[in-house]
Amino acid sequence: MTSAGVLGGTLAGAVLLSLVATPVHAAPRGPDADLAGVRSVLRSALRDGAPGAMARIDDRGTVLRAAVGVADRTTGRAMDDADRFRIGSVTKIFTSVVLLQLVDEKKLKLDAPVDRYLPGLLPDDRITVRHVLGHRSGLYDYTNDMFAQSVPGFEAVRKKVFTPTELVNRSLRRPRTSAPGAAYSYSNTNFVVAGMLIEKLTGNPVRTEYQNRIIEPLKLRDTLYVHPGMKIPGAHARGYLTQDRSGAPLVDATEQTVSWAQSAGALISSTRDLNTFLSALLGGRLTSAAQLAQMERWLPSGTGQAYGLGLRRRDLSCGVSVYGHTGAVQGFYTYAFASKDGKRALAAVANTSNNGTVLNTMLRTLDSAFCGKATRAPRGRATVERHEDVAPALSLD
Ligand code: HEL
């Protein structure tokens, strides 16, 4: 049974709410998800400058959906929760899963040096695969320099096609941020190296491995790796990059190669596919229990946050912890998180970026989805890494 309705509102665009297929056995454990709360957060994101926003919760067969504002500022088409979008660093979970499957297949050892598989790539043979997947390699994040100025930085790479080695070499021109294993320091370089490991060990492009190991088995119809293609195929939200200068017009960033990120951030997906993927992963259907446990060996990565292997944990105000990743790619902010057992998953997206207020606001969808009505996080202060590279105005805890 599906019911859907368009609710009126003072903000641009439509608010779409629907409740689909509630089987009798589907009583969720923990507080009920607060869809009205999610919708209210999405509307706040519009007030903060996002053209549109959407979210989907999958909870033991119950689907809750909300979409507000516009997917396309030119045509005025309303945001639809089925729209595809760029997921940025949520890609890192997919990359990590492929590598952990290779560990399961005894083709890779987490504690072996990267140098064993990619001789001569990195200057320090103490850097292990585990260091790379946990952002503890000390490899400098080359995107810090690339996007120091948001729009000029983006336009300089929008159509570029890099080899992974070129990206790693950009990192190696800078000093390492720490000795291998000594400290957590988020770096896209790590997940470019991870993609190179996939290609070396399998002999296939990362696209083939995402496809064969995750996308096809889970029937993810909206999840695509089109690099170096620039378009998002099918129905999609357009993405709008906020300029550094306050009041300057948004820049339509939808079309780009995302070659600067590749296996660190170039996947396209949908809210439905992300929820299916995270539920499968956390439900133990993508790796052995032993490798999932490796992904969930947490080390602190900021207030209320921890990082495993390509996986984030966020501790919410109501005491619930959720597992997934965030994504910030030009034009799109994504939160994709699920409960420990994967039975409740939330994917929330705003079609803007470089706007710390929107990012902070969207964080509150997690509380509405996993804490329900009872508990509220303090408003408007997200703990976000590398904030200076993501949104200059963002304040941190
Ligand atoms: S940043 C993050 C997020 N990750 C990292 C990765 C991703 N995205 C990037 O590295 C892109 C950075 C530039 C994004 C751009 C914008 O907002 O569109 N910002 C600027 O150009 C600022 N000067 C750690 C937030 C993650 O959550 O993992 O995705």
Image (spheres, rainbow, N blue to C red):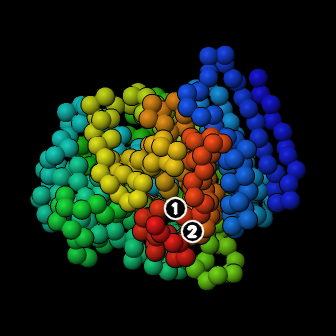
Q: Return the residue nearer the eye: 85 or 289.
A: 289
Q: Residue furthest bottom?
A: 245
Residue linked to disc 1? 382
- When the figure is inspected, residue 141 is found, relative to residue 369, above or below; the finding is below
Q: Amino acid at mark 2?
A: Gly
Instruction: Give the structural element (helix, strand or loop) at label 1.
Output: loop
Q: Nearer the viewer, mark 1 or mark 2?
A: 1
Q: In this figure, what is the number of numbered marks?
A: 2
Residue 132 placement, left or right of 115:
right
Quarter location, residue 48: bottom right
Name which residue lies at 40% across and 53% down.
Answer: 305
How far apart in space, not on screen, are marks 1 and 2 (Cα)? 9 Å
Q: Is residue 94 visible?
A: yes
| Residue 92 appears in the rendering | no
Q: Residue at x 46, y 74 (%)?
A: 388
Amino acid under disc 1: Ala
Question: In this image, 96 relative to 329: left or right?
Answer: left
Mark 1 nearby-residue class (10 Å; few <14, some 14–19, many ≥20): many
Kindly identify which residue carries mark 2: 356
Q: Residue 68: x percent and y percent?
A: 75, 52
Q: Where is residue 151? Give x, y as percent.
A: 56, 77
Question: As rendered, which of 259 and 182 lies closer to the eye?
Answer: 182
User: In which quarter of the view is residue 33 placed?
Assistant: top right
Expressed as whole percent of the image width and height from the top left, the position of residue 244 reads 58, 80
Q: Is mark 2 within 8 Å of ligand 1?
A: no
In the image, taking residue 257 as reference, residue 362 lies left or right, namely right
The residue lying furthest to the front in this view is 374
User: For the residue labelled by badge 2, is the local secondary structure a helix, a strand or a loop?
Assistant: helix
The picture places residue 239, in percent across and down from the top left corner, at: 63, 61
Within 10 Å of the Cα at label 2, are there few (<14), some (14-19), or many (20+) other Cα atoms? many
Mark 1–mark 2 CB contact (< 8 Å) = yes
| Mark 1 vs 2, N-terminal side | 2
